[in-house]
Image (tube, grey):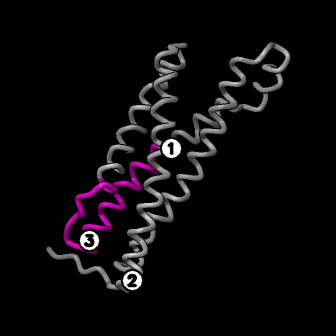
Amino acid sequence: MNLAIPENVKVWSQFGHPIMMWVLLGLSIYALYLGMQVRRTRTADKEVRKELIGKNFNLKHHKIGSILLALMVLGTIGGMAVTYINNGKLFFGPHLLVGLGMTGLIATSAALVPYMQKGNDFARYTHILLNVTLLGLFGWQAVTGMDIVQRIISKM
């Protein structure tokens, strides 16, 4: 069975992945801010900690992290699907490989949460390291992704 996708849908579908990923980059920066506030809360003296606990940084960080995990996995799969639908193949290159690696990093980072909740400092520092690496790679992906978008636009 050959599914016929209208040409205008194929063309415009190529912009969903980059838009979604730019939103996720912004959410990732917000998650970093929240994570820093969680750490600040944990290390603050009693008076300041009491005030910071009321701002629920921990809960907000956890919720944003969950959203990031789900949308990054879906965005990665969606980006590959749209590329395949429009080109009949995936382009094996740094953007694809780094994107897949980032998906693995965020999944591993999320898997550390139960250990962090039990006070495991190794898990906490690993979580931070993975997410800082992820954010750096995300910035690089944004630049290389815009190069890809420019190539798509030039073919239109």
Q: Are marks 1 and 3 in contact (CB under 8 Å)?
A: no
The circle on residue 135 is 1
- The residue range painted magenta reads 68-96
Between tags 3 and 2, which lies in front? 2
78 inside magenta stretch:
yes
| Residue 31 appears left or right of 75 | right
The reply to whether callout 3 and callout 2 are in contact (CB within 8 Å) is: no
| Residue depicted at x 32% and y 48% | 100
Look at 49% across and 60% down and name the residue there: 20
The three-letter code of the residue at mark 3 reads: Ile
The CA span between labels 1 and 2 is 29 Å
Mark pair 3, 2: CA separation: 19 Å
Cα distance between the residues tagged 1 and 3: 28 Å
Q: Position of residue 58 (x, y in %)?
A: 65, 29
Q: How far across and down, in percent of the image, does residue 136 sit?
A: 49, 44
What element does badge 2 sit on?
helix
Counting residues from the N terminus, which is met first, the one under dot 1 or under dot 2? 1
Using the rendered view, name the quadrant where residue 103 is placed. Answer: top left
The residue at which mark 2 appears reads as 154
Checking the image for residue 95, the label placed there is: none
Q: Amino acid at mark 2?
A: Ser
Of circles 1 and 3, the one toward us is 1
Q: Amino acid at mark 1?
A: Leu
